């Protein structure tokens, strides 16, 4: 399991393979504007596999049950692809906004 976690640092940040407890600065209830910059990561950490399955389900346009039946590697690869694609789109949009 450690090798799998190490293979997906975008999904499992180093040293944090489990969701934070409530009241923890990286997630849980009470997130405010200070942590707004990290909101997607805090959300993913709080909801864990449900957030990941929801993202993959939306990407593949299939029900959650189909995602749960996939292999873990297939699901993690699709999730990482989607996360990188979205980050690339956000960067392109930000560059566009700065030049226009």
Image: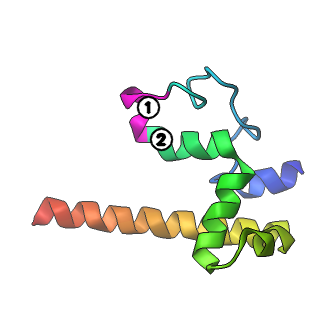
Residue 87 rendering spot, x and y as whole percentages: 44, 62
Which of the 4 image quarters holds residue 60?
bottom right
The residue that appears at 40% across and 39% down in the rendered structure is: 37
For label 2, the SS is helix
Where is 57 relative to 30, above or below? below
Chain part drawn in magenta: 31-37
For label 1, the SS is helix
**Label for residue 86?**
none
Where is 14 relative to 4, above or below? above
Q: As rendered, which of 90 and 49 lies closer to the eye?
A: 49
Residue 72 rendering spot, x and y as whole percentages: 83, 66
Q: In this orientation, does residue 13 appear?
A: no
* Residue at far right of view: 1
Where is 3 relative to 85, above or below? above
The residue that appears at 76% across and 41% down in the rendered structure is: 17
Q: Left or right: 29 with respect to 99?
A: right
Q: In this orientation, does residue 36 appear?
A: yes
* Cβ–Cβ under 8 Å for marks 1 and 2: yes
Residue 97 rendering spot, x and y as whole percentages: 17, 62
Q: Which residue is mark 2?
A: 39
Majority secondary structure of magenta residues: helix
Q: CA distance from mark 1 to mark 2?
A: 6 Å
Q: Which residue is mark 1?
A: 35
């Amino acid at each position: 399991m450690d090798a799998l976690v190490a293979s997906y640092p975008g999904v499992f940040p180093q040293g944090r393979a489990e969701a934070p407890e409530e009241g923890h600065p990286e997630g849980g209830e009470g997130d405010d504007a200070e942590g707004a910059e990290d909101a997607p990561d805090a959300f993913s950490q709080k909801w864990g596999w449900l957030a990941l399955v929801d993202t993959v389900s939306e990407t593949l346009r299939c029900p959650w049950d189909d995602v749960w039946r996939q292999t873990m590697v297939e699901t993690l690869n699709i999730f990482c692809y989607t996360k990188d694609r979205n980050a690339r789109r956000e960067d392109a949009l930000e560059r566009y906004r700065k030049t226009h």
